Structures are given as structure tokens and as C-alpha cells.
Image (spheres, rainbow, N blue to C red):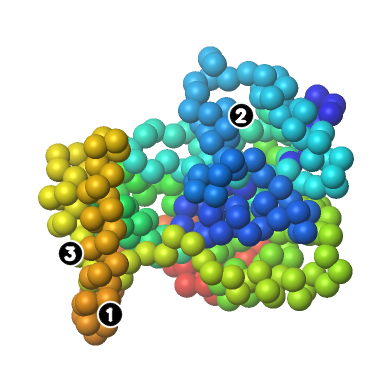
Amino acid sequence: MEKNNAKVLIHLGIPKTASTWFQQQIFNNNNLGFTNFIKTKNTPGDRDCLKYFVNCDDFSFFPEMVQKYYETKFSEIYSRGLMPVLTNELLSMSIGGRLMHQKSVSKRIYDTFPQAKIFFFIREQKSAILSIYKQLVKARYNESLESFMNQAMDFEKRTIISINYYMYDRLLECYQENFGRENVLVLPFELFIKNPKETLKKIINFSNASPKVNNLDQYLDEISTSEKINTSLKAGTLALKSRINNVLFYPNPARPDFTKQKVQQKVSNALGKSLDLLIPEQQQKHMETVMKELVKQKVGNTFQESNRKTSQLIGIDLADFGYLT
């Protein structure tokens, strides 16, 4: 492998755009021409990506060292006619209050793999933020949605999730400036929901992967109907489960001692599944409406200008997919 000339697809997420499904069904699928470096099925993304591009400072980052690490791995993958994929949704944003400089991450990736192709989904912000909240509560988060949104909307404080990450034009411009517009593919997640097969074909064509199946359309139809992963609990269940988490994971539910709280986690998971079945569907739908309205009120027109810019940068009118522009 020539220095700085590796062909690789970098998948950035973002969180709550079926990243785990893509990592398991698409980007580790040799029949579609892809393979990745996720070691186990339950691992949330390629951890080496975070080690080399996110969890280091500028003084401990050396692109030549990262290139050397991947050199043999990539050579073996190329010999099989496959496209390597580095994939972790936390390459795009941080969850949990840790500070992340998206521009620095973009530059580190470029310095290491300037010939890379960059792909990520975006998702309508209100929907994405609410989905993040649901996933956190499903785990162990104990704050109310209103408290969560008040913290997220604070542009100055470091909170569990920052609203700044959802200014998609900023992230997109970082990568387009480094890699060139033609080497960055950004699609609304809603397009995948609406037309999964055509979206998958766009990604495959963009990446220059070489599928090994005779009938790609039929194969993609079959994959598109496979079960999605990390589905959230229903809204009424979440309202109760956040209070349950406050009891089970006191005093620090966001950063528990995992070795001591495995039992609590199992109890929390079991209660969540039970409540999903026990709470009447009408009440679940009512709470879903209440949650969506609260997020809408808190967000307001925060993302309007960013969405306009993003539409221009990707050549897709995001208003057609429910984004405020």
C-alpha cells in the first residue's frame, strides 16, 4: 500500500441512523463488496477509529503510525476484492458530555487517508434528538425529557448531548473542504426509510465497492426487510422508566459502576419490556405526542439556517423530508 493512498470508506454515523444495522448488514457484507473491523457483534462500532481519530490530542496523533497499523489489514482486504470500511457513529459527534472537536477529527482522518470516501446520514433534528433521549433512558438515563432538552439547548455548557452537533452544515463543510465535494456523500436518513434499496445502491456506487451477487436488486430487497436493531421503548414506558432508573442507578446513572450494576441493568431492561406491554396503546401514543411537542417547542427554528445551507451543500431539498428550512 502506497503511503497516503489507501482506498477506504469512512462511515461517520450519525447516531440514531441505523448505524449498527449498517455495520452488521451492509459494511461487513462481502457479497456487497465491503468488510469492516468490528470485532464482535455487540461492539458499537470500530473502537480503533475512536482511539486513533477522536480519543487523542494533536500532540499524540501521528498519521504515519495509523497508516502503518492499517497497511497490512488493507492489503489483505484489497486482495479479496473488497472495500475496507472504518465505521463508528461517534466519529461525528460525542454523547455523554465529552468534548469533541469535529474539525480536528476531520483533519486527522484526511491527514491519514486523503483518498478516502466519506459517508454519513443526517436525520431531522427533532426526531434525532428525541431518539437519542429514548435510547439513553432505555439504558439508564434518569432525567426528564424537559431537563434533557434544557441541557442540550445550552450552547455553552458541556452536557450529555450538544445541540451544536446537529448543525449539519458545519460537519459537512469540514469534510467537503478536506476531501472534496465529490468524495463526500451525505444523505437524509428519511430517504433510506422511504426507499432503502435505492439508497443502498447510491452508497455502493459512491464507495466504488464491487458487489459479488448476480442480482443486486433482489439481494438488496431481501436485506432491506431484515430486522432493525436498537429499537426504542414506547413513550409512556420511557416516562416511567426514567424515574425507575433514578432509583436503580442512584447516584450517577450516566456513569455507573458497570461491574456492580449488572443486576440493576437486567431489572431495568425487564421492567421496560413489561411496561411496553402493560401501558395502554392510547396512553403510549398520547405521551409520544407530548414528547414531540416539547422537543419542537424547545428547538424552535434553531436549525433553520443550517438546514438551508446543508440543502445547498448536498443538492437535496431537505424540506421535502420534513426539515425546517
> Which dot, 2 or 3, sits closer to the camera?
3
Residue 240 - label: 3
- Establish if 127 lies above or below 41: below
Alpha carbon of mark 3 to alpha carbon of mark 1: how far? 15 Å
- Establish if 129 lies above or below 61: below
Q: Earlier in the sequence, mark 2 or mark 3?
A: 2
Q: In this orientation, which residue lies closer to the viewer: 102 or 72?
A: 72
Mark 3 residue crowding within 10 angstroms, few (<14) / some (14–19) / many (20+): some
Left/right of residue 86 with respect to residue 283 in the rendered view: right
* Residue type pointed to by label 1: Lys
Measured from the top left, where is residue 38 in percent x and y? 60, 43
Alpha carbon of mark 2 to alpha carbon of mark 3: how far? 42 Å
Measured from the top left, where is residue 37 in percent x and y? 64, 40
Q: Circles 3 and 1: CB distance less than 8 Å? A: no
Left/right of residue 182 with respect to residue 192 in the rendered view: right
Can residue 181 be seen?
no
Q: Circles 2 and 3: CB distance less than 8 Å? A: no
Say what secondary structure mark 1 lies in: helix
Residue 280 occupies quadrant:
bottom left
Residue 107 occupies quadrant:
top right
- Identity of the residue drawn at 71% across and 47% down: 35
Mark 2 residue crowding within 10 angstroms, few (<14) / some (14–19) / many (20+): some
Q: Earlier in the sequence, mark 2 or mark 1?
A: 2
- Identity of the residue drawn at 23% across and 63% down: 271
Q: In this orientation, which residue lies closer to the viewer: 292 or 143?
A: 143
Say what secondary structure mark 2 lies in: helix
Q: Earlier in the sequence, mark 3 or mark 1?
A: 3
- Identity of the residue drawn at 14% across and 39% down: 251
Disc 2 designates what residue?
108
Disc 1 designates what residue?
285
